[in-house]
Every structure is written in structure tokens, then in C-alpha cells.
Amino acid sequence: MRRWNKDPKAWQRFRPDKVWGFREGQVVPAAALVSRTLGPETRRRFALARLWRDWRTIVDPFIAEMVRPLSTRKQTLVLGAQDSLVMQEIHFLAPEILNVVNRHLGEEIFDKVVFELISGKIPLDRGSEPKGTMAAPKVKAPEKLGTLQHLLESDSAIGRSYRAYVRRFAGKI
């Protein structure tokens, strides 16, 4: 490898068209440059990231609802199912899933599909989605709040519950 700082004419001998296959002055998409400069393992990881992102459009929507991608192990695609019944039934569709995935990737990366129960694992096709927090719905106070005077004065369980109910809407809780 040449040391650029010792040889001032080295930059003149550097020819992008010879290294990357593009003509000088040609507008080239950044993705093409990245794919040619990165190694095969990095290109494989980018392809897998596209697979996880597009999972619901690649496989049949029915299958996408039943199984989700969990991981890879060498040449094995690991898919997760919500319950064992689905896992048992979807096992018969494994060759079809394998063909669709390899066709999408453009090469035969996977040669086997394994199914596991999701049981709390985060699927790869939804890992980047933000988890929304659901706010408690605003409940407006009833029009005749506190009109059951005999329950407000009672020390029974119903009376205590009714007083708590009135305090909730009166803003005292």
C-alpha cells in the first residue's frame, strides 16, 4: 500500500474509474459507492436490515402476522411465533418462506428456517418503532355529582367508595 504523504504524485495515479468502475465526472449514487467499498459481510448486514424493515411486504401478510423475524444463526433464519400451535402449522410453509426471503436478498443466504416462541423477545421487524404510551382518557364529571347525600354520610363500603368517587371528580384526589 502506498503512503500518500511520501509520494506527491500518488494522487495523480489514483484513478476512481479503475478502482470503483465509474467514469470521472459521473454522478454516482452514494449507495453504489458504499456497496463497492464495504466488504461482503457489511453488505450482507445491510441486506438483512432491509429484510427486517420490509418483512411485512416481502412475505404474505397472513404469514407476517403469524411469524416475525427474531435473528440469524450462520445460514439459519430464526422466526418467532406467538404460540406453539401457530409454530407447528407454519412449519409446513418454511420452504416457501425460505424461497421468498432468499429471492428478496438476491442470493441464497439462508438454507434453513427455525421457529421459536417469541415469549418476550423483541422481533427485528419492529425493534425501531417507538413504544407509545397511552394517556388515560379524560373523563368528565357527571352532572349530578354528590347528590346521594345518604351515601356520603354512610360509613359502609359503598359510602366510602362513593365519597372517593366524588373526591376524584372534585379534584381532591
Image (tube, grey):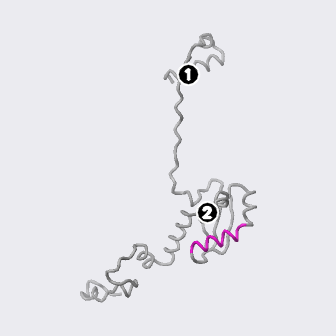
Decide if residue 26 is on the left or right side of residue 152: left
Mark 2 or 1, which is nearer the eye? 1
* Residue at the limit of the structure toward the left, as seen here: 8
> Which numbered dot is residue 10?
none
Amino acid type shown at disc 1: Pro
Residue 77 sits in quarter: bottom right
Q: Measure the alpha-carbon separation of dots 2 and 1.
A: 48 Å
Residue designated by label 1: 142
Q: Is residue 109 shown left or right of residue 33?
A: right
Say which quarter of the image contains residue 154: top right
Quarter of the picture holding the N terminus: bottom left
Q: Quadrant of residue 91?
A: bottom right
Q: Is residue 102 magenta?
A: yes
SS at mark 2 in the image = strand
Residue 133 vs 139, above or below: the answer is below
Q: Is residue 54 above or below residue 99?
A: above
The crowding category of the residue bearing disc 2, from other C-alpha atoms within 10 Å (few below 14, some 14 to 19, many at least 20), is many
Report the magenta residues as a range.
93-105
Q: Which residue is mark 2?
A: 69
Residue name at image x 58 percent, y 78 percent = 107
